[in-house]
């Protein structure tokens, strides 16, 4: 694992990505919202799985592509909301299922895959992460 001053992290494996995400989860307070972007297969769900581990969640974490959202109780209290908006066309569609209630929950950590589909309604304090495929299993994760 390596980082530099540009808020970039280079992951060499899924395990690296999960470890980075777990460390980030441990440093963020409840109420945090993370917007993930990147191509299909970039590792957004791998990142989310690692983030969940950092919150102490041990159950399997998979992509909620068809369910749109999965809710996980955190062992220390609060919730982890994992959203995949790939099948959502725009912010209005997301508001129809109540995305705003999840994003505004002060007792939860929320990760949104394909967050660019609702960029206009994301909270101002949202942490944006972009995952780019490099070579093989290598990924560049840009935070900011």
Image: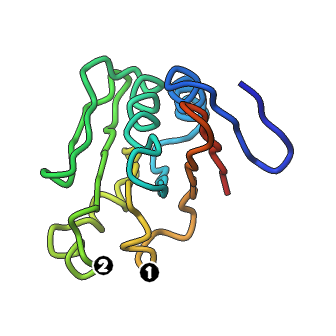
* Farthest residue, direction right: 5
Q: Residue shown at 76%/29% (left/top)?
A: 2
Residue 37 picture location, percent across and down: 48, 58
Dot 1: within a 10 Å radius of its alpha carbon, few (fewer than 14), some, or many (20 or more) residues?
few
Dot 2: within a 10 Å radius of its alpha carbon, few (fewer than 14), some, or many (20 or more) residues?
some
Q: Residue shown at 47%/45% (left/top)?
A: 42
Query: Which residue, given by chain and number where applicable, does mark 1 sit on?
Result: 120
For the C terminus, the quadrant is: bottom right
Query: Which residue, given by chain and number where applicable, does mark 2 sit on?
Result: 91
Task: Name which quarter of the figure residue 115 lies in.
Answer: bottom left
For the N terminus, the quadrant is: top right
Q: Residue shown at 28%/61% (left/top)?
A: 85
Residues at marks 2 and 1, CA–CA distance in whole angstroms: 7 Å
Q: Nearer the viewer, residue 89 or 55?
A: 89
Residue 93 picture location, percent across and down: 20, 77
Q: Nearer the viewer, residue 140 or 81?
A: 140
Residue 64 vs 122, above or below: the answer is: above
- Mark identifier at residue 139: none
Residue 29 lies left or right of residue 99; in this view the side is: right
Task: Name which quarter of the figure residue 4 lies in.
Answer: top right
Residue 131 picture location, percent across and down: 55, 49
Residue 76 lies left or right of residue 17; in this view the side is: left
């Amino acid at each position: 694992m390596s980082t530099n001053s540009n808020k970039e992290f280079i992951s060499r494996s899924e395990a690296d990505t999960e470890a980075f995400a777990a460390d980030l989860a441990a440093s963020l307070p409840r109420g945090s919202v993370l917007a993930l972007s990147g191509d299909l297969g970039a590792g957004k769900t791998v990142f989310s799985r690692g983030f969940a581990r950092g919150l102490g969640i041990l159950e399997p974490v998979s992509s909620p592509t068809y369910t749109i959202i999965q809710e996980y109780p955190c062992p220390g209290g609060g919730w982890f909301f994992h959203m995949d908006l790939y099948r959502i066309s725009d912010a209005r569609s997301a508001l129809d299922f109540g995305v705003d209630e999840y994003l505004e929950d002060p007792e939860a950590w929320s990760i949104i895959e394909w967050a660019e589909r609702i960029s206009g309604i994301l909270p101002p304090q949202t942490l944006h992460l972009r995952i780019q495929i490099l070579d093989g299993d290598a990924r560049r994760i840009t935070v900011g």
